[in-house]
Image (cartoon, helix red, strand yellow):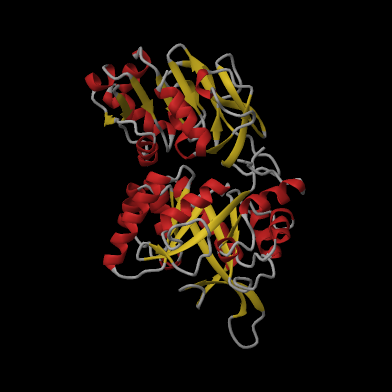
Amino acid sequence: MLTKRIIPCLDVKDGRTVKGVNFLNLRDAGDAVELAAAYAEQGADELVFLDITATVEERKTLLELVHRVAHTINIPFTVGGGISSKADVSALLHAGADKVSINSAAVRNPDLINELALEFGSQCIVVAIDTRYISLGEGMPEEHIVHTHGGRKPTELRTIPWAKEVEERGAGEILLTSMDSDGTKNGFALELTGTISANANIPIIASGGAGTMDHFREVFTTGKADAGLAASIFHFHEIDIPDLKNYLRDHHLPMRMTN
Amino acid sequence: MKTVIIKYNAGNVQSVMYALDRLGAGYIYTDDEDEIRTADKVIFPGVGEASTAMSYLREKGLDKLIPSLKQPVLGTCVGMQLMCRYSEENNTTCMGIFDVDVQRFPATPGYKVPHMGWNNIFDYTTPLTQGLPDDAYVYFVHSYAAPVCEYTVATCEYIRPFSAMLHKDNFYAAQFHCEISGHVGQQILHNFLTL
């Protein structure tokens, strides 16, 4: 049976993971490669690396990191952050990334999604959507609105039709982050995720809000998500991946068990 | 031992190269006929669309070369589909090594197409799956699949049962991506390289 996927997300800067990580047994918890290998061994189904650097020099470091990760882990991994051209994507895929994730660039230039899908295949193009429930102006109702710049800047795009549009343009997956839930540990945005997933023919990776193992159960059932992504709860061992997978399997969700 | 990865416009095959690197296996990435003919093992990867890939193979004469190979050949993903007789993807006549037609997954409520992610394979009867646990999980990304047929040596189920692996004589094929299928995929590649 096709399983639900558990995806740890690593924020990287200058080739190292940022946001503290608290992995025992690692020589260097900041070393992204070592952390990636540890997650792969624990049964993570996939990894996402989010590059939060800006400069060209640092981008080179990212490519070196991707190259080292590809030589080390044997599960799919996605790289996102600051990707805005075919050349960026080509360099990352060449360095060994299995997929790339684009966000602001897709909002600025939606045709980029079509171009990337045509050039590299939909299977490696993830479109990340950061969304917030806000009112676009006085007297206007609150709606789910796409944001860019790490969720700080609202656009004029409504999230639900945008999700459909990116699929039609050739996205292979959607990484949906609810900025309202992100960091709260109060659970994923179930209703929005469920609406988008029910409406989509491509997988939806839900992100933002995971605090307990039951939050994952909810996002896979009520939220109809295909994958659940989280960062700090994994980094700080608040939830260990083998425990999470056992829990979800015991709740009748299809899981890839590796141990 | 000489392993060749066949070079054609098959999208991103870097992952396959990295997987061989992880196994410590050397390889040559080429579309040169002599290099391919003299290889001990041939890997025919594939990501992308069937008709474009077949036109390219025809242009390079690889559509005749590949079926004539005598050493072990492993086709993966679209590579496997191109080794079948025909694909519904843009109505494409393929190489016909496996006498079976590749079909699109039927639109079915509750199932997304592509079939993407980790799924278990079962009913293995091939040397390539030696050492695998029962119901091993591998990583799939595809919208088309070969039905279960006389060459099926591993089955998977999504909407309906389909061929996860095929085998006939020296030709082996996997619908999933061995190169990113964890230890299971690594074992399969290792088994192929040590045939």
Q: Is residue A38 rendered to the left or right of residue A59?
A: right
* Outermost residue to the bottom: A138
Task: Please determine whether, in this image, residue B66 is positioned above or below residue A24.
Answer: above
Q: Whole-percent x and y of residue A63?
A: 32, 56
Q: Quadrant of the N terminus of chain A?
A: top right
Q: Is residue B185 rendered to the left or right of residue B119?
A: left
The image shows a total of numbered marks equal to 0
Residue A45 appears in the picture as rendered: no
Q: Is residue B96 rendered to the left or right of residue B41?
A: right
Residue under the image location 52 percent in, 60 percent down: A9
Residue under the image location 39 percent in, 17 percent down: B72
* Outermost residue to the right: A251
Nearer to me, A149 or A242: A242
Task: Please determine whether, in this image, residue B159 is positioned above or below residue A16.
Answer: above
Residue A74 appears in the picture as rendered: yes
Residue under the image location 38 percent in, 27 percent down: B44
Q: Quadrant of the C terminus of chain A?
A: top right
Q: Whole-percent x and y of residue B104?
A: 57, 32
Q: Whole-percent x and y of residue A21?
A: 51, 65
Nearer to me, B10 or A217: A217
Q: Which of the 4 image quarters holds residue B144?
A: top right
Q: Whole-percent x and y of residue A59?
A: 31, 63
